[in-house]
Image (cartoon, grey):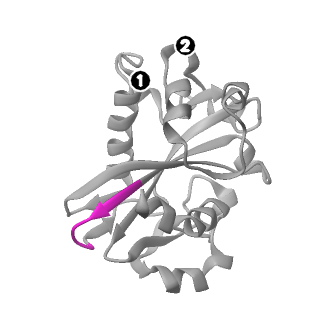
Amino acid sequence: MAEEQVLVVETKLVETQGLFHGLQFDVKRYIDTLFVKSALRFMPRSQAENDPTYKQLIPYVLMTHNGSVLSYVRGKRAGETRLVSKRSIGIGGHINPADDAPLFGEPYATYLAAVEREIKEEVDVQANYTDRVVALLNDDTNEVGKVHLGIVHLWNLDAPAVTRREQMITQLEFIPIPKLREMRETMETWSALCLDGIEKMQAQ
């Protein structure tokens, strides 16, 4: 079976716009730099997971409705074993070559279409929604974070109608933000960082 190929950019390209920790709300500057054909490439996942000179681009979609955020716990079938049993408020994953035909005719539009497909693999959204990219996310304090760059999307749903497709998603429910804050210590790092910045994201 062929090894999974994942979309990456060179870390030094991110550094040209300023490497940051946590959330970066100046989205357009980074998007304009990263989403050009010359910057994007696919790499075997086993290589990318152990090479911090590259960042895997990961869409991280937050789904909100009426003051609550969709949350779940990663089960034992999670592809990223380092995040098993952690609570999350982000849905998304790697961008693979199957998401791209031909190779990034218009890179950002192709990426957005890939995000839609990735989300549909994990959950079934039976609601209308708006989709905005509200932040970038970087955390070099742990081994997972060093090789990933999150692109945070905010989906505002008109109904709390989402069900799981992936087996690794457990305890899926919309939870009010104050209650999520009480659960912060159980969250994966990216979700905790997003929770800290959720009001700023919603206000944009």
Q: Nearer the viewer, residue 3 or 47?
A: 47
Q: Secondary structure at mark 1?
A: helix
Tell me if label 1 and label 2 are in contact, CB under 8 Å: no
Mark 2 sits on what residue? 38
Mark 2 residue type = Ser
Residue found at x 19% / y 59%:
128
Picture coordinates of residue 57, whole percent (x, y): 56, 37
Mark 1 residue type = Pro
> Dividing the image into 4 quarters, which one contains the C terminus?
bottom left
Residue found at x 31% / y 62%:
156
Q: Which mark is residue 107?
A: 1
Badge 1 local density, few (<14 within 10 Å), some, or many (20+)? some
Residue 90 lies in the magenta-colored region:
no
Asked if one can make out residue 17 in the rendered structure from this viewpoint, the answer is yes
Picture coordinates of residue 179, whole percent (x, y): 51, 86
In the picture as drawn, the residue positioned furthest to the top comes out as: 38
Residue found at x 71% / y 45%:
20
Q: Secondary structure at mark 2?
A: helix
| Residue 125 as seen in the image, left or right of residue 103 | left
Specify which label sits upstream in the sequence, 1 or 2: 2
Q: Nearer the viewer, residue 193 or 55?
A: 193
Q: Which mark is residue 68?
A: none
Residue found at x 72% / y 31%:
15
Residue 158 lies in the magenta-colored region:
yes
The image quadrant that residue 190 belongs to is bottom right
| Residue 191 as seen in the image, left or right of residue 67 | right
Picture coordinates of residue 75, whole percent (x, y): 55, 68
Q: Which portion, as a residue range, is magenta?
A: 154-160
